[in-house]
Amino acid sequence: MIGNYSDPDGLPGGQEQSISTWAQDHEAQAKFQAELREFIETKPLYSQSTITLPPARVQFRLELARLYCPSQTCQKEQPFKPGEHQYWYHYNDRYLRFSDKQIQRKFDLLMSGTFPLELECQECRIIYSFFINIDVKTGRVMKFGQMPMWMPRIDSDIAKELGSSCGFYVRALRSLNESYGIGACAYFRRMIEDYINPLLQLLHDFKKEEGAAPEELQKILDVKAGKNFSAKTEYAGQICPPSLLVQGMNPLKELHEQLSYNIHAGTDKEATEVAIKIKKIVEYVVRSLRKHYVAQKEFVDAMKQNRKE
């Protein structure tokens, strides 16, 4: 049970009931955990999200998150959980009576202000501290601090596939982490401009292994040789392999549409949401297309070899 609350004497009428009710509502607890976990794991600094907050201060805690651990022991994604001792920093903490660890009753409710979330790596015990600003009335939360310092983490398969374009990817992630959405979109676009020809070549090779007609293969090469970036991304969406479709959604077509967003017409907040979508699309396409191409080529080569034998 999350935030087990007892003896709520001194709270105004109805508030102790809401705390007790939430403590027994496993569905509400699960929803809060899912929303808070997504916020901590995926949202960059200074971005705002709206989540369904619990009524009590002790109930505002995250039970589990999967985060990249930068320690020499780990250097990979690990499960993080709250440590044995939780520390709360809030302007009303001057009223805490630390001698008997008893919180004064009128401050048991979750109040608007700044709180940390401290999570411990379950492998090496390194502590992640996130500083969260809460607006209880609106349910809005904003992450404005994080230790250890956030640094872009690029998986080796993505870095290898992007090659020289990876530098723009790193700059995009740095901008995204600080909610500079316009800058992130600009760097993502520059990255795709640099990577679009290798992507079209990979699509060409993929189609060739599938046995595509010579005129179809030549069409891809003609588009690749062109100068119109938008035409290239649009055509990539048109020839997206069926194996890349996800529940009928075409990631390359979606990438073209997201890149068409006018970053100068919107706000940083709007551009941040666009940049987050582009990041997810790029990571999926970069990983999946190469993986499917290699698997398909290995299969075709094996079948050709068997025929020779």
Image: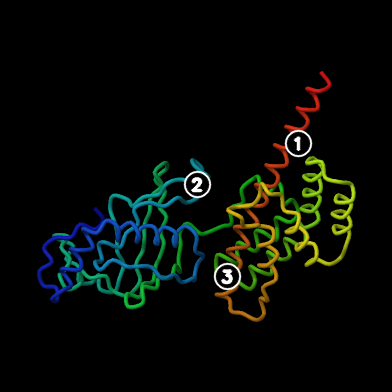
Residue type at mark 3: give it. Answer: Thr
| Residue 150 numbered tag | none
Q: Residue furthest top?
A: 309
Placement of 73 over or under 143, stated as above or below: above
Q: Position of residue 191 (x, y in %)?
A: 72, 61
Q: Residue 26 or 33: which is nearer the viewer?
A: 26
Q: Position of residue 32 (x, y in %)?
A: 34, 61
Q: Left or right of 137: which side holds 301?
A: right
Q: Secondary structure at mark 1?
A: helix
Q: Which residue is mark 2?
A: 77
Placement of 195 over or under 300, stated as above or below: below
Q: Which residue is mark 1?
A: 297
Residue type at mark 2: give it. Answer: Glu
Which of the marked residues, 2 or 1, is nearer the chain's N terminus?
2
Mark 1 vs mark 3, foreground winner is: 1
Q: Left or right of 281: which side holds 78?
A: left
Q: Residue 262 or 116: which is nearer the viewer?
A: 262
Mark 2 vs mark 1, foreground winner is: 1
Q: Residue 162 or 292: which is nearer the viewer?
A: 292
- Count neighbours of disc 3 (C-alpha within 10 A) and say few if under 14, some if 14 to 19, many if 20 or more: many
Q: Left or right of 39: which side holds 225?
A: right
Placement of 34 over or under 178, stated as above or below: above
Which of the marked residues, 3 or 2, is nearer the chain's N terminus?
2
Q: Which residue is mark 3?
A: 272
Q: Secondary structure at mark 3?
A: helix
Mark 3 vs mark 2, foreground winner is: 3
Give the residue displayed 39% in from the left and 73% down from the top: 140
Q: Residue furthest bottom?
A: 265
